[in-house]
Image (cartoon, rainbow, N blue to C red):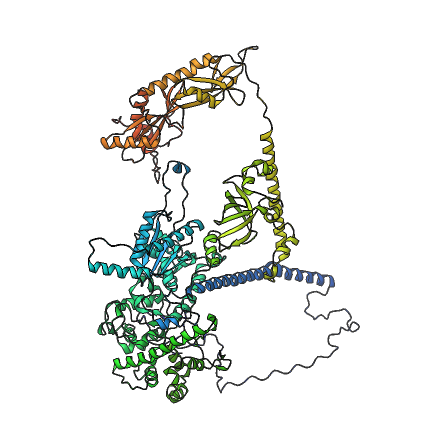
Amino acid sequence: MSSSSSAGPAGPAEDDDDIFGGGAADDDDDDGDGDEEIPDDVEEPEPLPEPEPESEDDDAFDDEAFDGDVPQNESAPCADPLLRAAWDDERRAAVRLAVEKYLVPSLVDELRNELRRKGVLAVARLAAAALKRRADVAPFRLVDQGSNGLDESASRQFDGCTAVGVAVPRPDAFASSEKERGRPPPGEPLWLAYLNGTGSLADRCSVSDRATERDLPSVRAAATFFRRHVPDVIVVSTSAGMGACRRAFRFVEYCMEAARTPMEGPEDETIEQTMKREEREELVAEWKPTLAFADDALARIFSLSVRSQRELEAAPPSLRLAVSLARSAQNPLAELCGCFTCMGMAGGGGLGLAGEELTSLKLHPSQDAVPAPVLLKEYEKVLVDATCRAGVDVNRSLQYEHHFGSLAFVAGLGPRKAAALKRASRSGAGATQEEGGGYGVVTSRKALAALFDVTKYDRDRGARSACFQNAAGFLRVRPHGPLADLAVNPLDDTRVHPECYFHDGTNSFDWAQKMCADSTDQDYEQGDLEAYQEIVHEAMDDSRRRMEKNLKRQRRDAFDQADLWKPPAFGTPHAAVIESRKGATTLRDDEADEELEDKLSELDLDGYAKLIEDDHGRRREQLEDVKRELRYPFRDDRKPWTRPSDQQVFDWLACQAEGGRIKPFQIVAARIQRADDWRVFTTTDVGVPGGLHASVLAVSDERIENCKDWLARDEMRPKFDRHLATDAVVECAILKVDPERMRVELSRRDEDVFFPVSSEDFYARIDGRHLDNSFDATAAVADYVAGARRRQDRALRARRDRERRVDDANRPKPVAPRRAITHPAYRPGCDYREAERQLDAMGAGEVIMRPSSSGKVALTWAFRERVYLHVEVDDAPAASPGEPPRFKIGDEEYEDLDELLARYVSPMNDFSEDVSRHRKFDAALKDPDACAAKLKAMRAAAPGSIPYALWVDARYPGRFALTYLAPRATTCRNEWVKITPEGLEIRDRRYFSTDEVLNYFKRHAKDWAKGGKLAQHRAKAPPKKDARAASPPREKRPKRPSNFSSGPAAPAAPAAP
C-alpha cells in the first residue's frame, strides 16, 4: 500500500504541546494474544500425573456393601437421624432460597442487559449500514461514469457541477372562513437556490407555492432564473406530499422548456450585445440538465440546525432546505460530514455531542431506542472509511465551511487537529507563502507538511510527524480554484503517499518519478521540478489516452455495463487470481496490462522490487499501487449518482409521514373526489391518489354497472351506503401499488377490508417464505385474524346503525298537538322561512307568531332590515284550573299574546330604534372588514382618539356591534350591546339609552383594551397585623363580567371619541 495508514477513526494522541504529534506511537499488544518469550531461568512445571482408567464397575452402586449408616467422626454435632434430616432440609431450603431469590434474578437481569446491549449495538450497526449506503454515492457528474468508474479519471473534472435545489413548502391548513372571504392561504413560497461548483449559494428565486403552467409571472421568473444560470442538475424535494411535489415538478419541467425558447433582443441592440446574446442562445439551446426528485430528509435537518442558522442566518427554512438539497447532489459525503461541525441540537437541546443532529435522520425504525453516543460512534466509523476511500480536497475544505467537515474524518486528524490545520494554513507562514500560495491555500503536499510542524513550519520535520504520515495519502491538492494557473505536482492528486516521491534520503524515496521516467525512456534530475512534473504528466496522459480508447471500444462491443472490464481497486493484492474475460486464469494487474497496453505496462516491477528489497524491505505491493494510481488517479469506486427509480420516488412522496412502505391489504381512509362510468377516484389519508373499480366498489361481490349513477342515485345503494357522496370518507384496503402512475388500487369488498378472515385465507394470499425461522407465524396469524374480526364487528354495528337512521328518517314523524290560537299576528301554517319572506315586505320592528316544530309557539322578530331573531315561546302552567296555559320567555310569564307583544316586543323595538337613531350608528356597515377600514381611516385622521362605531352584524341578530380601535392597536375589538325588554345590556350592565351605554364604554375602553394582567412572579411578604389593622378598609370593586379577565383595572378618564 502506498498510504502508510489505513482508514480508521482513531488517530495519534492529541497533546496540548504538540497537537499534530511528534512521532508514531509504539504498538502495544493490548489483546494479550501475541506470543511471549519465556526466560531461560524459569523452570517448567512438572507434568500432571495421567488419570487412571476408570473401571466399568465404578459407577455401579453396591447396595449390599452399604449398611445404611453414614460413618460419623468423633466431632459430629449430632448423630440423631431425624435431626440430621431436619438440618438437610434446612440446607436445601437455604440453597433454594439463594438460587431462586438472589442468583437466578441476578442472572436474568444480567442476561437481559446483555441482550439489550447486543440489540442496541445491532440496531446501531444496521443504521450505520444505511448511512454507508448514503455515503457511498459519488457526486453528480456531467458524464456517465459507467460501472467501471473510469470516466472521472478520463474527464478530470475539478470544479464540480452547478445545481439548483427546489424546496416545495408543506401545505398549511387555514380556517374555512378565510376561504370564504377570498383571502389567500398563508404559507412559504416555492424557493429555487442556485449553487456554483463549490457549493456556495450564488442566487435565489421565489415563486408562488401553488405555481402552475398558467401562472405566467411565476413561469417568467423561473425561466429567467434558469436562462441566467443554466445549472447542470435540478433536484426537487419530496417531503411536502405527493400532490404538491408533483405539481412543483411539472412546473419546473415546463419552465425549463420555456427557458429554451429563443428571446428577441431590443431594437437598439449593438453588434457586441447581439453577438453575446446569440452565444447565450446557443448555450441555452444545448442546455440539457438532469431533473429529478431527491430525498430531503437530511436537508430538512439542515434547515433547522445550528450550522444553517450560522451560515444562512437571514434565509427562511425553505431556502435552507433548497441549499442543502443541491449540496447533497453535488457531494453527498461532504453534506453528511458537515453534520459533525456543530455540537448539540438547535435551541440548546440534546446532549451537546458533535454530529448529534444526524441522529434525527431516520435510518432504522428502532434507532430511537439507541443512545446517541453509541449511534454516533458507529456513524463516525462509516464516515471515516468513506472519506478515506474518496479522498479530501484540502484547499476546498479549508476555504469553505460546508466542506470543512470532511477534513475532520481523515485518518490521523480528527476535529481538533483539523481545526489546528485550518488555523495554521490561514496564518500565511511557511511553505504556503513561499510557493506562491495565499492565506488558507495549500499549494502542494510539501507545503502541507510544513503546516504539521507547529513550532518552525519546517517541511522535513512536518513530513516526519506521525499525523502527516497518517493523513497525507488521503489529502488531495487539486489544480482548480486558486491553483488553476499554478504548476501543481500531479502526484499530489493521487493516493500515492509522499514517501514514494518526496525523496529526502531518509524516510522517503523517488520511486514514482523513476517509474514514470523508465516508462517514457527519459532521465530526470531531482532538482529540476518542471522536468520531473512533465515526465509524470507524460506517463499519466499516455495511460489516460489508452484508457479512453479502451473504454470506447468496450462500450461499442459490450451489450451490458456488467461486461465492461474493471481495473483492480486500490489496495487489492497483486497476487489475486481472477477469471479474465477471455476465459484464462490471470492476475488482476496482468489483465490490466493486457487491456491498456500503455507505457507503464512495460515496467518490470518484480525485478525492481527485488533490487530494493535488501535496503528497503518488501515493496512489491506498494509499487503496484503506485502504478495503479498513475493510470487512474483516485478512481472513484462509489456508486454513481443516478436518478431515483419510480419505487424510490413513490416511497419518498407517499411514505415520509408514515415511516414505512405502503403495502397491499393496508387499511386506508379514502375521500371520494369524483366518479366516471368505471371508476371512483379518491384521495387517501397516506397522501396517494386511489381508485375504486366497479368490480370492488360494493362491499359484497356485486358488480356495479355504472359508478357515476351508483354514486348519484340513493336508491341504487344499500341503506348503509346512502350517506356516500362527494367528499365522503370510506374505509378501503389497498390491492395494488402502482409506482409508475403514482397511485394505488383500492377495494371496498369485505373479504379485502377485513383480511384475513381465517388463517387459511392468510396463507392462501400471503407468501410466508420470507418470514424468519424464529418468527412465531401461528401466533401472529391468530392476532391478525382476531383483529380483522374485531374490525368487522365494529363495521357491522355501524352499518346497522346507519340502516336504523335511514329507516327513522323515512318513517313519518308524529305531529305534536298544537294550541288553538286566534290572533292577527299568528300564522298557523307558516314556518321560519315563510315568516322571513313575509317580514321582508313588512319592515324592521314587525313580528310574526308561528307554530314551532316542537309543537310550541315561535316568535320571529325583524330586528333590522333582513336581520331576524327567532325566539321559542315555552308553555307555563295556567293560573287556575280550566284556563289555557300561559306563555313564558325566560323567567317572564305572559297571559296572552297581546301582553307578550306589549311587554316583550314593544320595549325591544323602542331600544332598537334609539340605537339606530344615534349618530354613531352606521347602517351602511355590513361586515367586519368594512368596519375595520372605516375605523382605521378615522384613526389616520385623528391619531390620538379611539374611533368606534355601532353597526349590525347579520350573524348575531338581537345585538348591536360596538367596534373600536384601541390605542397603538392594529386590530379592532368588539363589544356587544344586547337588546332586552329591560334595556340595553353591555357586560352584564343595563342602561336605558344609547348615550349611557357609550359613556360607560368611554370610561372603560382603555382598560378593556389592555386585557387581564399577569400575576406577579413572586408574592410579597404580608404586612404585620397592626399595620394591616391601622390601614383603611379597601373599597370593594364590582365584579368583572365572566367573558373578561378578573384582573384589577383602575378607572380611567373618559377618552375623547
User: Residue 388 is drawn in which quadrant?
Assistant: bottom left
Relative vertical location of residue 219 with respect to residue 148 in this rendering, above or below: above
Q: Relative to the observer, which residue lies in front, 39 or 204? A: 204
Relative vertical location of residue 260 with respect to residue 1038 in this rendering, above or below: below
In percent of width and height, residue 126 lies at: 49, 63
* Figure label count: 0
Left or right: where does residue 602 sit relative to residue 368? left
Q: Relative to the observer, which residue lies in front, 153 or 382? A: 153
Q: Relative to the observer, which residue lies in front, 749 or 137? A: 749
Relative vertical location of residue 532 with respect to residue 187 in this rendering, above or below: below
In percent of width and height, residue 58 lies at: 73, 76
Relative vertical location of residue 921 with respect to residue 724 in this rendering, above or below: above
Kindly identify the residue that appears in the image at 52 percent across and 44 percent down. Answer: 676
Q: Quadrant of the N terminus?
A: bottom left
Which residue appears farthest toward the right when viewing the image?
64
User: Residue 636 is drawn in which quadrant?
Assistant: bottom left
Q: Relative to the observer, which residue lies in front, 66 or 717? A: 717
Q: Is residue 453 visible?
A: yes
In percent of width and height, residue 403 lies at: 33, 64
Q: Is residue 1032 visible?
A: no
Q: Quadrant of the C terminus?
A: top left
In percent of width and height, residue 737 lies at: 53, 54
